[in-house]
Image (cartoon, rainbow, N blue to C red):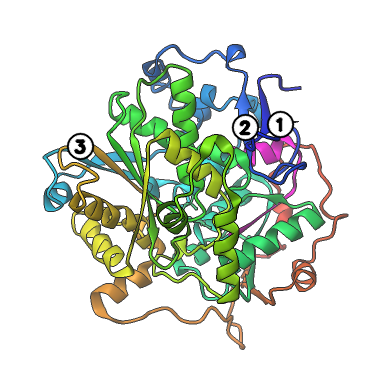
Amino acid sequence: MNTIAHQRCTNPACATTYAVTQTLTSCAKCGELLDICYDWDKVRVPKHLRDFESRWGHRRFPLDHSGVWRFRDLLPFAGDAMVCTIGEGQTFLQNAQCLGRQLGMWPGQLYLQYEGMNPSGSFKDNGMTAAFTHARMVGATHVACASTGNTSASLAVYAAQCGFQGVVFIGSGKIAFGKLSQALDYGAKTLQIAGDFDACLRRVREVSSQLGLYLMNSVNPFRLEGQKSIMYRILESLAWEAPDWIVVPGGNLGNCSAFGKAYMELLELGLVKRAPRLAIINAQGANTLHTLVNRDGLKWNNGHVDNAPIKNLYQQMDQSQYHPHTIASAIEISRPVNLKKALRALHVMNGVVTEVTDEEILEAKALVGRYGFGCEPASAATIAGLQQLLSRQIIGRQERVVCILTGHGLKDPDATVHYHTGVKTKNAIQPAAEPTWGRIANPPIQVADDVEAIIRALGITQDTNKPTHKGYVPSPADLPSVEY
Ligand code: F0G
């Protein structure tokens, strides 16, 4: 029994608690999001953040090598033996002198945090290592997610390396090829649902609860525990001094929520004196948070969030059959599941939200690429947002700013080639009628936006998905037998 950590409903009027050994993605009583909470009196948290530096020398110990788990005292929900790590979090903070100068900032004040340097090429690995660790704790065998691409790539990498069967739901024609290629290559069962990300997430939640699949989307509170480490690494790179601003793209709003929780806890523990301000950047074609915060004045309000504007907006979207649309496919989401936690992050980090157009995103992406180390379109929304916030004098030119580049430039080469040449390279993701596939080919399965059809296509039953409690069992038997 873990007496240090528990799960707690974020709705203060409910605040129901659950053991960390339970697998939940919302409060069983009121349906609101869950947090992982700690009894800090029982944790040996270092007195100063710089005490974490003592782990830098231990490169051969996987937990100290990981950029997530070297901060494990700040996410102490699992024993060391349970941790699923593949060396995530070896990312770096780069001082972007030239780009900063181009944006009219004071010298040395712009930094880029390259989360694309993770094993699967995006920031998702920070969260996946934590959620897989929890999946191992509860003996899960099958793990599932809906994804705009990066979550599925990350899930597929961890499933393949840590001995789980991965299942991913992607929207039809909605995924960048770099990301799709990862899910297929790493052997995840890939269902292409006739719908967008919001439909995929709805379906994967239904199917997971019917079949007992372990859900890896950011409604899983353990995912967000791992993503807190991005804030720790930025502090580490800046000699433990918080920057003035963190700028992050907003999609399902898990990442910004994790950042807010990281600073909430660091402040509570007295490990930092102040939090940076937070700027969350929506794409104009997927701007739910921007609309609710800036048009409707929605606030965290100590957890008593007014549900009426959210309900109204979602009703309007349903009535007009609205579907989000942006070149930044990673953040093409209109019903962000972590909306309320993002409001909390805005409160904790005195944040702002804004929106940028696709044209601004693409120009910013090319600019990041021009100075070396590119990023995918969603990540470049941060630079486009920064440009706008500088010109509106919300961010000062003398302030120290960190933009989170969430995904690698090679994730979406189509967007890049199209920007530079005008040529669209993306073909339909229809497997060829006359297959010329290899022996362990894993083509995506096209399926209607319908639970029964999805379950049939998956071929998984509750019986084949019994918890094993065996822990880590990487098995070559999971591959079809192939004679070489
Ligand atoms: N940037 C990239 C590259 C992403 O892949 C995502 C989300 C975000 C930003 C937004 O992060 O959801 O925490 O606000 N991608 C998800 C996916 C939704 O399925 O890969 P968020």
Disc 2 to disc 1: CB gap under 8 Å: yes
- Residue, disc 2: 36
Amino acid type for the residue under numbered disc 3: Glu
Whether 94 is among the magenta residues is: no
Q: Looking at mark 2, is its residue's CB closer than 8 Å to ligand 1?
A: no
- Residue 252 placement (x, y as % from top left): 52, 54
Amino acid type for the residue under numbered disc 1: Val
- Residue, disc 1: 20
* Res. 439 in view: no
Left/right of residue 64 with respect to residue 246 in the rendered view? right
**Circle on res. 399:** 3
Give the Cα distance between marks 2 and 3: 33 Å
Category of crowding for the residue at label 2, using alpha-carbon neighbours closer than 10 angstroms: few (below 14), some (14–19), many (at least 20): many
Left/right of residue 475 with respect to residue 121 in the rendered view? right
From this view, report whether residue 346 is shown above or below residue 307: above
- For residue 32, which quarter of the picture? top right
- For residue 429, which quarter of the picture? bottom right
- Nearer the N terminus, badge 2 or badge 3? 2
Quick one: 194 or 18, which is closer to the camera?
A: 18
Q: Residue at x 75, y 60 (%)?
A: 207
